[in-house]
Amino acid sequence: MNSMKSPLDRYKIRCPIHGNIPFSDRERQIIDHPFFQRLRHISQLGFASYVYPGATHSRFSHSLGAMHLAGVVFDHLVSSPQSCIRDQFPEDPLHYFRTILRFSALLHDCGHAPFSHSSEPVFPLRNTLDLPVKWYSKPLDMQTRASHEDFSIAIVFALSQGSSPLLSEEESRDICSLIDHDISPSDFFPNSSHRPFNIHPLLQRLVSGEVDVDRMDYLLRDSHYAGVSYGKFDLDRLIQGLHCTATEHGLVLTMENNVRYAYEDFLLARLHMFLQVYFHKTLLPFDFFLKQAFQERELDLQITGDLENFLMLHDDSVHSALWKVRTKKWASRIVFRKPPKRLFQFEHYHPDGLEELMIQQLKNAGIETLFLRSSRYLSKFSTLPRDDANSLLIRNTVMGKTMYLPVQKVSSLLDQYRQNADLKYLYCDQENYESARKILIPFLESRKLL
């Protein structure tokens, strides 16, 4: 798939997923900055390589891929014969939108800490970060735990500060407004005076939405490196079927009716990757072990709001800290790869409260257990009312008449997947597995669950 050629695309880097990725002088300056180069040392999938040995790729390569797709999707939306964008905006604003969109996709993950999401539960409070509070459209609770998005905002803001900033403050704010939907764009952001043609919500959803460039890239990239087929979908078909239309809420994404099957395939690819890779039964305990190692201060390492300190944090520094305390309870389990044994997986048809009863049975026998739970939805659109137009709109033409319908009204798949996929696992140490089985088998048989 070829994006609109630009004289700014002076450089190219080779990507195993998208082929050549072109980038401009200014994009190269951001890519070369230590804040972004740090992502070379942040694994995209945390502990996934413990199960899928090929899954050692980094947030660096994913961010480049997301930037590339942002340009591809934007160029398609602008150049499409059905586009209403080019009629509303001259070349200079279009160039600005494309620039800000690609920067946002490039920098959206720069706030990830070692092992990506695995270390996020031990982030510091927001008040330790230098956040541009005045940019937010509503009061920001500074006493809550920071997220990786908060660190991304702090980093993008930092790139506009100092004696040699790489971004203007207006650019920095506009980039952040696409990463965090609670940040409003700057007064410099060019927009149509007609509300139906407000392009900002559309650009936000391309960076972080239901059909965004982040997911498009990570599904294909993660499945490629993990060596599985779950995350594959027809990228070309999906992008070519995307368009936009003007509504009272601004410009929103639309999709051709016959492309909704590619969209459904995209949704299922994401759900199956969560069930089979991201929340693999062996990986969830390692995330828990790392969180405990941080919280119980086993590690001589701390994540603070100081960005200079943050620059020094990468997967290798955590590995090194874990190795130094390899005799500690949680560190030893990670260093020597000692996952617990899964005893039971709870399904939707099991009675409520079953996990508490099983845990109590084992506790009475002196067997320590670990219960982990995680859930994901197929699409947030599946939870919206069928007539709610604040979603992806499906474009259908019948006898020369065009109508737009919310995707949740058209897609039978979204009707079938209105509930979250809920994963609940019960574990015990491997040396206690046989003893635990002897206790649980008669317990489950008496309830006709075996």
Image: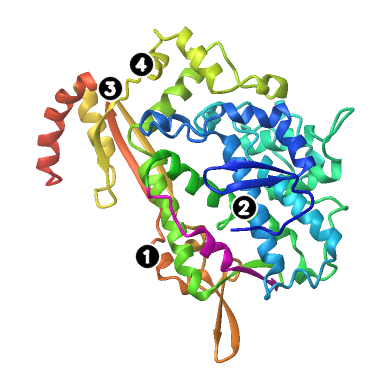
Marks 1 and 3: which is nearer the front? Answer: 1
Relative side of 435 to 36, left or right: left
> Closer to the camera: disc 4 or disc 1?
4
Residue 124, position in %: x, y? 63, 26
Q: Which residue is mark 1?
A: 416
- Disc 3 vs disc 4: which is toward the camera? 4
Asked whether 165 falls inside the magenta stretch, the response is no
Quickly name the residue at label 4.
336
Q: CA distance from mark 2 to mark 4?
A: 39 Å
User: In the rendering, which numbered label is found on residue 368?
Assistant: 3
**Disc 4 or 1, which lies upstream in sequence?**
4
Q: CA distance from mark 4 to mark 1?
A: 42 Å
Q: Which residue is mark 2?
A: 69
Q: Secondary structure at mark 1?
A: helix
Dot 2 or dot 4: first in sequence order is 2
Q: Secondary structure at mark 3?
A: loop
Graded by Cα atoms within 10 Å as few (under 14), some (14 to 19) or many (20 or more), the crowding at tag 2 reads: many
Q: Mark 1 or 2, which is nearer the eye?
A: 2
Q: How many numbered circles does the render carry?
A: 4
Task: Give the CA distance from mark 1 to mark 3.
Answer: 38 Å
Q: Which range is magenta? A: 229-246
From the image, state whether disc 3 or disc 2 is nearer to you. 2
